[in-house]
Image (spheres, rainbow, N blue to C red):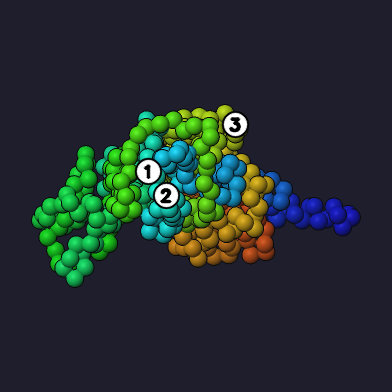
């Protein structure tokens, strides 16, 4: 037997051992007893290590953000299209592009603010409300008060959320405009009315900071901008003329990192609108996704309804997510993906994923009865794997499903 033949046989044997070990680990968990799909393959060879119902469709939860990241990188390149504008002799017309950074508590974008502050012309906010749908199809209606369910808009401000806190006996509400419609009650938490921006506040001496999504509108956006600028802003729906300009500012990765690390749903949704603005398309979300599916075969067969994965209507196969990971490798590079994706035991939503032997860079996704994880795993010897593990319809805690997924990854060693 030649050295080359021996090496090939040895590698095949080791791969077979890994496959058997993963298979044994899989059947030691509850994953086979619920609706689960798995595909694990070697990065170097593409050889399948383990597969189980990989061609079946599952709810991906926030694993959907991997598709959003791929198409954002593919369409936006490096820079964020912050806003569009058109000037006449006496007026400055402006339109949102979906950029979520203005007045955002962490992103702190200010390009549009500086443009409007510097202008002595009549300021006209010209967005058409018909081009956006504030809530995604398949979102749970009773999530409206939770920070992960902020509304989608063409010109987000303050992350489309109200910041509420009681400190030293004083309620601190930002933006201040929302303090005009409040009521003190005997309840224990801050609640927004379902059909308005009215806030019920608890009668308490202190209250930790909480973010509450607010109901958006073109008119409210103009008023919030006017409050900061101390200038009048006119609202007047107008189609974007061909001569309008796009102002670019900031790096796309400054949006992708929080989307992946903290699973920021609003950023994920707004990235679709940024793509549309760059391409000259209009919303709402379903229309943007329809265009993207026509151009990108990797998402053509998915049931894809939002950018974040918050919708229970999204349906994706493990094979689809593996292909998305392959294309991210080709277009972004593995080195860069290790920065953009949270790392097991160290960062973001992967901080509490403790692996015994290797390291994973991956996107998790969860909501009731569902825990999904897709990304890359590197074993102790440096061998890389792609994986997608989707577990749906579990009549048990998300933590229990997560533990089973970690068991499967630990079998790779």
Crowding near the residue tagged with mark 2, few <14, some 14–19, many ≥20 C-alpha atoms within 10 Å: few
Position of residue 295 in the picture relative to residue 175 (left or right): right
In the rendered image, residue 118, in percent from the top left (x then y), is placed at: 43, 53
Residue drawn where x is 11% and y is 54% of the image: 185
Does residue 27 appear anywhere in the picture? no
Residue drawn where x is 49% and y is 52% of the image: 255
Residue drawn where x is 52% and y is 61% of the image: 344
Q: What kind of element bears circle 2?
A: loop
In the rendered image, residue 182, in percent from the top left (x then y), is placed at: 15, 52
* First reached walking from the N terminus: tag 1 or tag 3: 1
Disc 2, disc 1: CB below 8 Å? yes
Residue farthest toward the front in the current orientation of the protein: 89
Report how far apart the C-alphas of labels 3 and 2 lie in the structure. 39 Å
The residue pinned by badge 2 equals: 119
Q: In the rendered view of the protein, which quadrant contains the C terminus?
A: bottom right
Q: What kind of element bears circle 3?
A: helix
The residue pinned by badge 3 equals: 295
Residue drawn where x is 46% and y is 60% of the image: 348
- In-front residue for pair 1/324: 324
Q: Nearer the viewer, mark 3 or mark 2?
A: 2
Position of residue 406 in the picture relative to residue 19 (left or right): left
In the rendered image, residue 284, in percent from the top left (x then y), is placed at: 42, 33
């Amino acid at each position: 037997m030649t050295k080359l033949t021996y090496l090939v046989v040895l590698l095949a044997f080791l791969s077979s051992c890994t496959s058997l070990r993963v298979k044994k680990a899989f059947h030691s968990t509850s994953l086979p007893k619920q609706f689960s799909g798995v595909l694990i393959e070697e990065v170097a060879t593409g050889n399948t290590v383990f597969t189980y119902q990989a061609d079946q469709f599952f709810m991906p939860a926030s694993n959907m953000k991997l598709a959003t990241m791929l198409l954002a990188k593919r369409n936006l390149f490096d820079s964020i299209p912050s806003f569009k504008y058109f000037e006449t002799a006496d007026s400055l017309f402006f339109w949102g592009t979906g950029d979520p950074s203005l007045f955002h508590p962490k992103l702190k974008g200010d390009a549009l603010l500086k443009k409007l502050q510097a202008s002595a012309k009549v300021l006209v906010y010209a967005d058409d409300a018909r081009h956006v749908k504030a809530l995604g199809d398949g979102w749970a209606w009773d999530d409206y008060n939770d920070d992960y369910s902020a509304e989608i808009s063409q010109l987000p401000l303050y992350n489309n959320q109200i910041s509420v806190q009681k400190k030293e006996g004083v309620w601190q509400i930002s933006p201040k405009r929302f303090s005009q419609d409040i009521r003190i009650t005997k309840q224990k938490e801050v609640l927004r009315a379902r059909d308005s921006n009215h806030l019920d506040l608890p009668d308490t001496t202190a209250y930790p900071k909480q973010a509450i999504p607010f109901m958006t509108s073109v008119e409210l956006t103009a008023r919030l901008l006017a409050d900061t600028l101390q200038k009048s802003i006119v609202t007047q729906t107008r189609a974007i003329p061909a001569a309008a300009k796009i102002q670019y500012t900031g790096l796309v990765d400054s949006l992708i990192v929080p989307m992946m690390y903290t699973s920021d749903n609003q950023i994920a949704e707004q990235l679709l609108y940024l793509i549309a603005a760059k391409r000259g398309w209009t919303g709402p979300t379903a229309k943007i996704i329809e265009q993207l599916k026509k151009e990108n075969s990797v998402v053509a067969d998915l049931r894809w309804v939002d950018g974040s994965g918050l919708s229970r209507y999204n349906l994706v196969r493990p094979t689809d997510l593996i292909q998305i990971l392959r294309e991210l490798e080709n277009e972004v590079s593995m080195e860069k993906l290790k920065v953009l994706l949270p790392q097991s035991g160290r960062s973001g939503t992967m901080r509490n994923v403790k692996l015994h032997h290797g390291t994973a860079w991956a996107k998790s996704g969860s909501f009731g009865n569902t825990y999904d994880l897709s990304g890359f795993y590197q074993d102790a010897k440096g061998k890389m794997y792609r994986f997608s593990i989707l577990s749906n319809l579990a009549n048990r805690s998300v933590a229990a499903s997560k533990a089973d997924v970690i068991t499967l990854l630990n079998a790779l060693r």
